[in-house]
Amino acid sequence: MYSKEYSHAAIIAQNIKKYLSENKMLQKELAERVGIAPSTMTDYLKLRSRPSHGVIQKMADVFGVAKSDIDTTYKIEETQSLETMIDSASLFEEVKIDEEDRVAIKDLIRVYFLNKHQ
């Protein structure tokens, strides 16, 4: 792996370990719940490979977090797309949406998608 890819894999592994610890869950249990081999989970945590987008989403669902909490590259995309969507809705409806409303809308959307994947 290149340095940037290695660093990205390390961030993902660190976040998986964090959520395993917070949830008092073993790697094997997470692997079973996500539908992958325990050895594959070990490969992720030892930086030998990186999980696919779908596996990251499944892990996020198991932990009850956003996939951007595991793979930080999603934070930028998620924020931009939600902001763009809220701005578009505001223009379409010709209403002003303040920051408190923006937070509420983002939370609603995240909860919707978390529930949709369960």
Image (cartoon, grey):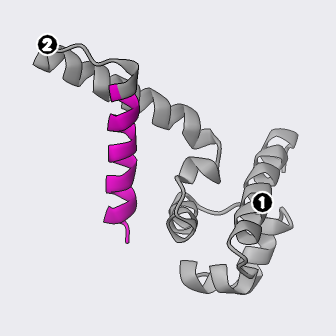
Tell me how far mark 2 sits from mark 1, CA to CA: 44 Å
Closest to the observer: 3 or 29? 29
Label 2 Cα neighbours within 10 Å, binned few <14 / some 14-19 / many ≥20: few
Label 1 Cα neighbours within 10 Å, binned few <14 / some 14-19 / many ≥20: many
Q: Is residue 11 left or right of residue 85?
A: right
Q: Is residue 31 left or right of residue 109?
A: right
Image spot of residue 73 (x, y percent): 62, 40
- Residue at image location 58% in from the left, 47% down from the top: 68
Compared with residue 30, is residue 53 higher up or lower down, i.e. above or below? above
| Callout 1 secondary element | helix
Compared with residue 38, is residue 3 higher up or lower down, i.e. above or below? above
Q: Nearer the viewer, mark 2 or mark 1?
A: 2
- Residue at image location 64% in from the left, 79% down from the top: 30
| Callout 2 secondary element | loop
Disc 1 residue type (three-letter): Ala
Q: Say whether marks 2 and 1 touch (CB < 8 Å).
A: no
Quickly name the residue at label 1.
13
Closest to the observer: 51 or 20? 20
Query: Which span is picked out in magenta?
Result: 101-118
Asked if one can make out residue 20 in the rendered structure from this viewpoint, the answer is yes
Compared with residue 81, is residue 43 higher up or lower down, i.e. above or below? below
Image spot of residue 3 (x, y percent): 87, 41
- Residue at image location 71% in from the left, 60% down from the top: 50
Q: Residue furthest left?
A: 93
Quickly name the residue at label 2.
94
- Residue at image location 54% in from the left, 71% down from the top: 62
Q: Is residue 75 left or right of residue 38?
A: left
Disc 2 residue type (three-letter): Glu
Q: Quadrant of residue 102?
A: top left
